[in-house]
Amino acid sequence: MNPAILIVYRPAAGRYLAQFRSVVEVATELGHHPVVLVPTGEIPPEVEGLTVREADLDSTAAFRAAVDGIAAEHRLVRIFPLFEGDVLPAARSRRDHGIPGLTPDQALNFRDKNVMHRRAEELGVKVARSCRPDTLGAVEEFAAQAGYPLVIKPYAGWACGSTYRVDGPERLAEVWEEMGDDRHEYRVEEFVRGTEFHVDALLQDGEVVFEQLSRYTYSVLEYRDEPGGTISRKHDLSKHEQRILELNATVLRGFGMRTGVAHVEFFLDEDGEAVFGEAGARAGGGSIVPAIQAGRGINLAGEWARLELDPEHRTEARLGPEIGTEYLSSGEYGRITGISSPADLNALDGVLDADVWKAVGDVLAPPVASNDVLGWYVCEGSDYDDVLARFRTVRQAFRVETESAV
């Protein structure tokens, strides 16, 4: 019986399609049988011809039961969760069946923001001051110490969903009402003023074999007001940027990752000091994976699979020019009557790749998370400012026309 790998795949909106295809391709090439676990009732066309199982992926018990069944039929040697929310259930299933990879204790370092910040502090990495919102008085006391604005977020969330910037007591009262009796699921942090970066990295046997530092072009918390963009920082790094890369390696090793892929966020505060934000044991979201593929020549998820399945493999990535990627957004709401196509965007100078997730007939509403967008594009430039200028050109060319959906 050939060894099998399990890919936990959520096909909604196509956000993980390129990752999924790359992992399947690598596994097949290396003689492993791909088994795909998808949400119940969501079998997409791209899994045709593969072994597919369905489960309620939002239920840890159902997830583990599904993996139990798969392991009874196949010699399962690895599990690849592509989505943030599946990292911890996948780790529990690895423990159930003695499969190498992140253990639940290690996975908690990447999923529970209370745990990850405490662990980062233990590693000597600076983090934002924080508290748990046990009572309104506790948050008010913290605000008196840290000052406004505050950030209130789920301790196990993603993509800025249910995340609030609180600029004063009146807004705190509103957010407190919105959280209601779910406040135990949240944490409160001071707002870090500075520039936000992310590092996308691959580890093999505890060594960083690929890393790319990138700088966000916007405040992630302000996704409702401006499109989300990020630009690589591959050339002429400052000493502060170099420090972020050093701290990233410290965090990943200290969190227990041996071989895997990670997306880690840092701030450079107003004093030039690196402050840890959060870390995910998965490839970067949105268009980060296609941007790195266009700019560096590797698919992060597929490369992760190759590192896991082939101990002799060595990652080779080209350097190339700076690469930027930005979400496609629109201030227009209602039913779409016309929208630019990927071909329209790819025809623009400097654009390397693009994808549009919305089509004529879809209804646009205000976003509720940072990845609630219309699509993305990737472009190249000589430096940060050049890529930023290309972003403006693409934004001006992108067209969305709508009518009332009522």
Image: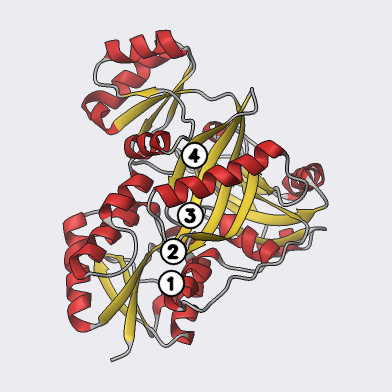
* Residue type beneath disc 1: Glu
Q: How far apart are marks 2 and 3 (CA)?
A: 10 Å
108 shown above or below 10: above
Q: What residue type is labelled 3?
A: Ala
Q: How far apart are marks 2 and 1 (CA)?
A: 7 Å
Q: Nearer the viewer, mark 4 or mark 1?
A: 1
Give the x, y percent position of residue 128.
46, 27
* Residue beneath the point at 16% across and 58% down: 61
117 with respect to 53 (left or right): right
Label 1: how many Cα within 10 Å (few below 14, some 14–19, many 20+)? many
Residue found 45% across the figure and 65% down from its top: 205
Q: Nearer the viewer, residue 223 or 35?
A: 35
Figure disc tally: 4
| Mark 2 touches mark 4? (CB < 8 Å) | no
Q: What element carries label 4?
A: loop
Which of label 2 and label 4 is nearer to you? 2
